[in-house]
Amino acid sequence: MQRVNPPTRGLLWACACLLCLVLSLAHACAQPKLLIFTDRAPQMEHNNQPYDPNIDLKPHLVPFLQELRKVQVEWYDPNHSVAREFAQRRDLKEEQLRDPSPVLRAQLARAWGATYVMTARCTRAPDTNQYEYAISVWELGKRAPVWQAQGFQQLATGVGGETAALQTLARTIAMRLDAELWSELPRLAEQVVNPTPRTAPRPTEPPSADPKQQLEQYLRDGKYYEALLPLRALVNAEPENPAWRVQLVRLYRQLGLLAQAREVLETATQLLPDDETLLQEWAALLEAEGDLAGAIARLQRALITRPDARTLRLRVFDLQLQAGDASQAARTLEPLANQTDEEVRFRQYLLRGALRQLEELPRESFALTESRAALWFQVLSGLAADLASELLDLRRFANSPNPNWSALRERGERTVLTALQIAQWAESVQPTDTTRTLLAHARFACQMLTQSAQHMARYLLSRKVEEEERASLLRIEAMRELESAKNALPKRTP
C-alpha cells in the first residue's frame, strides 16, 4: 500500500474542508425562497374620519416562518435594490412598484429568484374584537394558488392583548404551511454560531497564605476544586461557625460531590443540632439526591419542636407542593393564614392554583423571581395539562355516536371560563430579568389555550368542522409553547 506523505495528507484535508463548504453553500442557495406581498384593503370612513383597517402581519409572521427553516423568507419592499433595478429596466412608475398587480408580482418574484409568492391581508374593522385575514400562496409556474387560508382571529378579552392574538394567528399560519404545503421540504439545520473568542485570562497574583483571601481568590477565578482546601481549613479553624460549613456543603454540591456534602452535614448537625440553616441545607441535599420525601420528613420533625419557625414552615410548604401534595401543603400553611407579608401571600396564591380555586382571584401582583419560578411553573403546568385534557374529552364526546349536545355546550362554556381564569392567574406575576422569557412563553401558551377553548365552544354550538380543527391546532401549539417555557426556566444552582 502506498503511504501518503504528510504534506499530501494536509492538502487532501484542506480540499475536503473546501468541498464541504461549497456543498453547504450550494444547499443553502438551493433552499426555496418565499416572497411576501402585503395585500392592502382600501381605507374607509369611521365617525366621519378616515380609517385604515390594515394590520401589519410582518413582525409576527416572519419569525415563525423563519423558525420552520423550510424556505428563505423575504417581505416585499419597493425600495429593495432588486425592486429598484427591476423598475428601472421596465420603466415602471412609483405607484406600480408600491402596489404591484398580480402579474407584476409574479414578474418581481422571478427577478427575486423566488419559488413561492404569498399575499397576506389582515384587517380589523372599527369597533370589533376580531381580525379578518386572507393568505394565499402561489408557486411560480402554476396558475392557481397552491395554498389558501382565510377566516377570523378572535381577541380573548382581557388576556394577552392584540400582540398575543396576532402571534397566535401567525403561528397557526406557519404551522399549517409546514404541515399542508411544505411537509416534503427538508428542514435545514440551524446555523452554528461561532463561539465568541475568549479574552486571555488576566494574570492573577499567587494566592496569599491567608485561607480567607485564598478562598476569595480561587472563587473569583472559578477554581472551585482549589477552593476546597482553604475552605476546609476555615472549617477546622472555626468548627462552631455554621457559615463555613454551609459554604463547604454548597461547594461540594456545586461540584457534584454529594457524598462529601452529606458527610460535612452529618458532622455539622452533631455539633450544631439546632441550627436552622443546616436543616435547610439537609433539605436541599436530599432534594438534590432525589429524596423529596426524606427532605419533607426531616423538616417536619424539626417543625414539631419549633412550630413558630416561619422560614422552616414555608420551606416545608414548598416541598409538599413540589411533591404534588396540595392538601397537606394547605394544612402546613394554615398557622400563617393571618400573616400578610408577600412571602405568605405568594404561597396562598400558589395554593389557589394548585387546588384549582380560581374564582374571584384577589387583585395583587408578585415578582416572579428566579427562586420562585420552578414552583410557579409546576402549578401552571398542572392547570394547563388539566385544561388540555378537558378539551380532548370534549372533542372525544362530541365525536361519539350519540353526543349530548346540550350538556357538551354547557361544559364547553365552563371550559372557556376556566381557561380565562387560568390566564388571569398567570397574569398575577410580573417578570424579573431572569424570568422574562419564561413568563412570555407561559402567557402565550395560556392565550392559545383560551382561544382553543373558545373555538371548541363554538364547534359545540355550530358543529362546524373548521372550528374543531382550529381548536385542536391551538391546543397542540399551546402545549409546545409550554415546553418552550419549561426550557426557559432559570437554571438552579446548588
Image: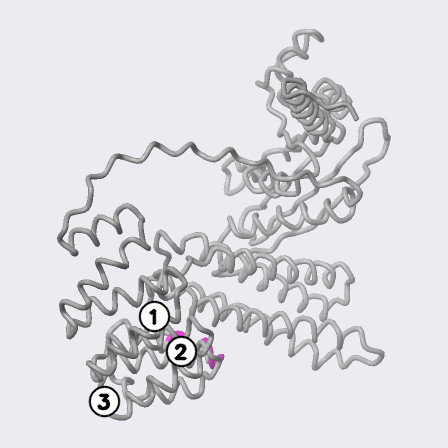
Give the alpha-carbon distance from disc 1 to disc 2, as whole Å.
20 Å
The C terminus - image quarter: bottom left
Residue shown at the point (62%, 67%) measured from the top left: 453
In x, y percent, where is residue 35?
68, 29
Q: Earlier in the sequence, mark 1 or mark 2?
A: 1
**Marks 1 and 3: which is nearer the front?**
1
Q: Could you say which is closer to the camera, residue 71 or residue 425? A: 71
Give the alpha-carbon distance from disc 2 to disc 3, as whole Å.
18 Å
Question: From this viewpoint, which residue is outermost toward the front?
Answer: 1
The N terminus - image quarter: top right
Kind of element beneath mark 2: helix
Q: Is residue 159 left or right of residue 474?
A: left
Give the residue at mark 3. Answer: 306
Kind of element beneath mark 1: helix
Q: In the rendered structure, which segment of residues is drawn in magenta?
A: 349-356
Find out whether residue 355 is within the magenta segment. Answer: yes
Q: Is residue 426 left or right of residue 300?
A: right
Q: What amino acid does circle 3 point to?
A: Arg
Give the residue at mark 1. Answer: 261
